[in-house]
Image (cartoon, grey):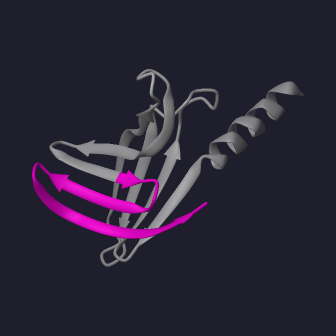
Amino acid sequence: MKAPIMVIALLCSGLATAQTLDTQHFTIAINCQSPEYEVGCDKASYQGTNKATGGTINLMGRQIMQMCADGVTPCHSLGYQFTNGKIIYFVSEDGHLLVTDGAKVLVDESGTWQF
């Protein structure tokens, strides 16, 4: 009896960390797959969908944390970073999607978080 309850608890805890950002051209689903007891999220998934084409991309990345004054303790989240070769996807906590290839900006959009 305990095993099914544990499975349900694990599934529900995963759902609690899912977030979706809706911008003008993209829908981005981010899911933290790190254990709930960890500060921050070292294992996050990104599924980006282009609204015009329906094309999707799936990436793995991590949460970027700002450190407290002691330089060791994480204070708060700045957002999530994902990489695809040289291309960097950054999704900020305030709903900003920035995709860059070196110094070249490929996407720069703001949106609304759905929790």
Query: Would you place residue 71 above or below residue 80 in this image?
Result: above
**Apparent side of residue 1 relative to residue 61 in the rendered image (left or right):** right
For image coordinates 42% across by 46% down, the residue present is 78
Query: Would you place residue 10 above or below residue 102 in this image?
Result: above
Span of residues in magenta:
91-115
For image coordinates 78% across by 30% down, the residue present is 6
**Apparent side of residue 6 relative to residue 110 in the rendered image (left or right):** right
Residue located farthest toward the right when viewing the structure as drawn:
1
Picture quarter with the C terminus: bottom right
Let me know if residue 99 is in the magenta part: yes
Residue located farthest toward the left when viewing the structure as drawn:
103
**Apparent side of residue 104 relative to residue 83 in the rendered image (left or right):** left
- State the image quarter where residue 105 is shown: bottom left
For image coordinates 40% across by 39% down, the residue present is 64
Residue 40 location in percent, x, y?
51, 34
For image coordinates 45% across by 31% down, the residue present is 42
Q: Which SS does the magenta portion mostly show? A: strand
Residue 95 location in percent, x, y?
43, 62
Judge by depth and name the residue closer to the eye, 72 or 95. Answer: 72
**Apparent side of residue 102 relative to residue 20 in the rendered image (left or right):** left
Picture quarter with the N terminus: top right
Residue 72 location in percent, x, y?
44, 20
* Count of marks overlaid on the render: 0
Let me know if residue 107 is in the magenta part: yes
Residue 87 location in percent, x, y?
19, 48
Judge by depth and name the residue closer to the eye, 97 or 55. Answer: 97
Judge by depth and name the residue closer to the eye, 85 or 111. Answer: 111
